[in-house]
Amino acid sequence: MTTISTIENDPARGEPRLAGAALSRTEPDRNCPLCPRLAGFREAARAREPEWFNSPVPSFGDPGAALLIVGLAPGLQGANRTGRPFTGDYAGDLLYATLLEYGFAKGNYQARPDDGLTLVACRISNAVRCVPPQNKPLPAEINVCRQFLIATIENMPSLRAIVALGRIAHESTLKALGLRAAAAPFAHGAMHQAGAIRLYDSYHCSRYNTNTRVLTPDMFRSVFAKVRADLDSPSS
């Protein structure tokens, strides 16, 4: 496990803050114009499917949670359609089943935002808040949207654990925390310490990764089993 201290003291508030964090706004506007390509793709989706959510997808869960899960971006027919992260696509089937198993969610996941499912001491967000063409955000778009990830992390006062789903989420989270990529390489099951926050890496729970056995359900569950054990440990 890599151990790196990146938490600085904020003299004005007398409390820790993330290095480089400057924004308090955690979510972009519904018509966010910061990434022209994504804004254009969003407008085309609105014209084609006016009943869909078709907006930057907000984080789901309590800001007071101890665990934050960071995905890549909304799926076109998943969160972009439903308005809730990982809701309505295959990745959500595996993610929410795992969260229910390890006590990070309660209720019944039925792949729609009104299914009554709630998160327990857990929050879910994305490195990029708008759906990208072919599920592939450009580096510039990831960089622009990181301001909202930074603000999300900064505005979670009880945060102790972050699970990054995939390499892009991992790399953007590293930058949000002020960690050097060379000192905290991505690997499934890897852990990296940033002050009071521990970052856990997992392959993304996409259909492609599970169909190709890059990620198995047992591999995915093992990450959350470790998070659960660490958060429940009196010494953590």
Image: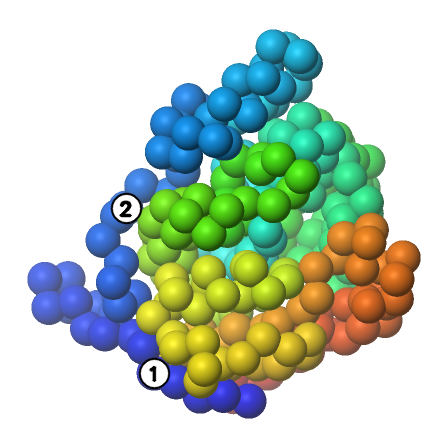
Task: Name which residue type carries label 1.
Answer: Ser
Q: Assess disc 2: are there few (<14), some (14-19) or many (≥20) residues with their C-alpha within 10 Å of its C-alpha.
A: some
Task: State whether residue 48 is above or below residue 101.
Answer: above
Q: CA distance from mark 2 to mark 1?
A: 22 Å
Q: Residue at x 49, y 88 (%)?
A: 2
Q: Residue at x 50, y 31 (%)?
A: 38
Count every numbered label the image shows and give the total: 2
**Residue at the farthest left position:** 12
**Residue 132, quarter of the rendered image:** top right
What scheme was used to colour the molecule?
rainbow
Residue designated by label 1: 5
Looking at the image, is mark 2 or mark 1 earlier in the sequence? 1
Q: Which residue is mark 2?
A: 24
Quadrant showing the N terminus:
bottom right
Residue 213: x %, y % from top left: 88, 66
Instruction: Label 2, secondary structure: give it.
Output: loop
Tell me the kind of residue under disc 2. Answer: Ser
Q: Secondary structure at mark 1?
A: loop
